[in-house]
Amino acid sequence: MISDPKRVWKTARNKDTSRNKLANKHFKSPLQIDHTESLYMSNQQTELLRFTTAGSVDDGKSTLIGRLLYDSKSIFEDQYEQIKQTSERRGEEGVNLALLTDGLKSEREQGITIDVAYRYFATPKRKFIIADTPGHIQYTRNMVTGASTANVALILVDARHGIIEQTRRHAIIASLLQIPHVVLCVNKMDLVDYAEENFENIREEFSQFASKLDVVDIEFIPISALKGDNVVNKSDQMDWYHGGTLMHYLENVHIGSDHNLIDSRFPVQYVIRPYSDEYHDYRGYAGRMAGGVLKKGDKVMLLPSGFTSTISKIDSYDGEVEKAFPPMSVTVLLEDDLDLSRGDMIIRENNTPEISQDVEVMLCWFNSSPIREKGKYVLLHTSQDVRCLVKEVRYKLDINTLHRNMDDKSIGMNDIARVVLRTTKPIFFDSYRRNRHTGSVILIDESTNETVGAGMII
């Protein structure tokens, strides 16, 4: 029997993580890393930036992250010795820094990234959570996983090969996921003798392509992850480049306005009701702030009932707080005893989300089996899961030209399409452009429990 609300609150977060076992074991939902992130944030008061890597195979994503960790002195000596010995055993010249993130045996054998690898490090200015994502086309779903909560996307391009199809695919996904900041890292500049012409050609080509996308902030940095040029330390080989290093960008890019602090959204994950004399009347609603700001004394509305109440208290893992904002995980207590359970939402009066059973999404399809029109799936949205039906496939997006193919409605693995879903009960959502948390959905195959798609609500 659990009698302490603080322990119950912690248990609630752990229970919410276990709920995601419904998804494919290779797909790590953002909900599964909330607990780690919350602890990481509570231990330090500096600002947290999440960034993800993207790019084709062998563009150097894992090497870049290894270089960031090594040059910023964010790895232990025994870790370095381990990868040094592994590199020597494999007959490699020098130390292969990519081994810092490629942890799976099959990744090290093939020299590729398969699953998303999360790494944590900090500098005096900021804390960082890195999502190292795969470049192979069959692992595009893992790239979506790592990018879904990122503030910055690092898209790597091989200076020898320039912009390729997978570069465009990842740029489109970054645009669909509304990642606020994109950095195009032109890697392996050492293999083209640090030529400015190669860098400028790639910058011009990508700029023309990105003009068709919904990407606001794009930065271009020429680097060599292997040699360390312009990663943490300024390069002596590229005196023609007058911008800052990648680390300087990550430490100084403005992310304070990345969260929606206007529309208050608090999806309830768990109802905390201790059974003890000490907390006899305690009834709290635990969850993670998805948008806006909630303060003690605020008048709020409960969905779907529409009843109103007032916030009497806000508890966090570290004690009572006066206000809550994204991405804080808190427990909200109300003055009135009202029926509120998992999947419901606390909002401000006169600022309601969309409430509907028909949801139109841009869907990234992950499964080898094509989408079934009129097929039934489980839809995960914030803290609730409902059954849904694929009502209509509007069009498929051509990732090279961005043209809408209205004739071909067959949606296979890694295709991106505009789809209308019909849910068994109304859900409370915003457009993805307005709120990334309340505007995203995940589709699960009922028969296999595999994660088959991720969607951004239009």
Image (spheres, grey):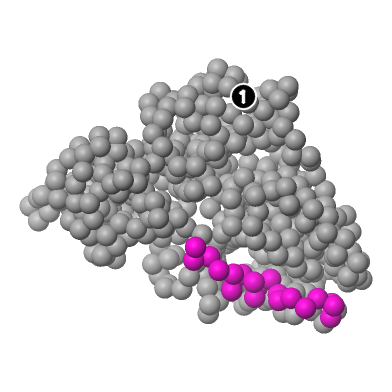
The image quarter containing residue 428 is: top left
Q: How many marks?
A: 1
In the image, residue 187 above or below residue 291? below
| Residue at the spot of label 1 | 393
Q: Which amino acid type is marked by label 1?
A: Val
Residue at the front extreme, as displayed = 350
- Give the magenta-colored segment's residue range: 238-257
Specify whether residue 396 is painted magenta. no
Specify whether residue 245 is painted magenta. yes
Residue 74 location (% of width, % of height) = 59, 74
Q: Is residue 409 left or right of residue 124?
A: right
Residue 370 location (% of width, % of height) = 66, 24
Q: Is residue 340 left or right of residue 433?
A: left
Asked whether residue 77 appears in the rendered view, the answer is no
Q: Secondary structure at mark 1?
A: strand
In the image, residue 108 above or below residue 96? above
**Residue at 29 percent of width and 38 percent of height:** 303
Residue at the left extreme, as displayed = 277
Residue 67 location (% of width, % of height) = 70, 70
- Camera-side residue: 424 or 260? 260
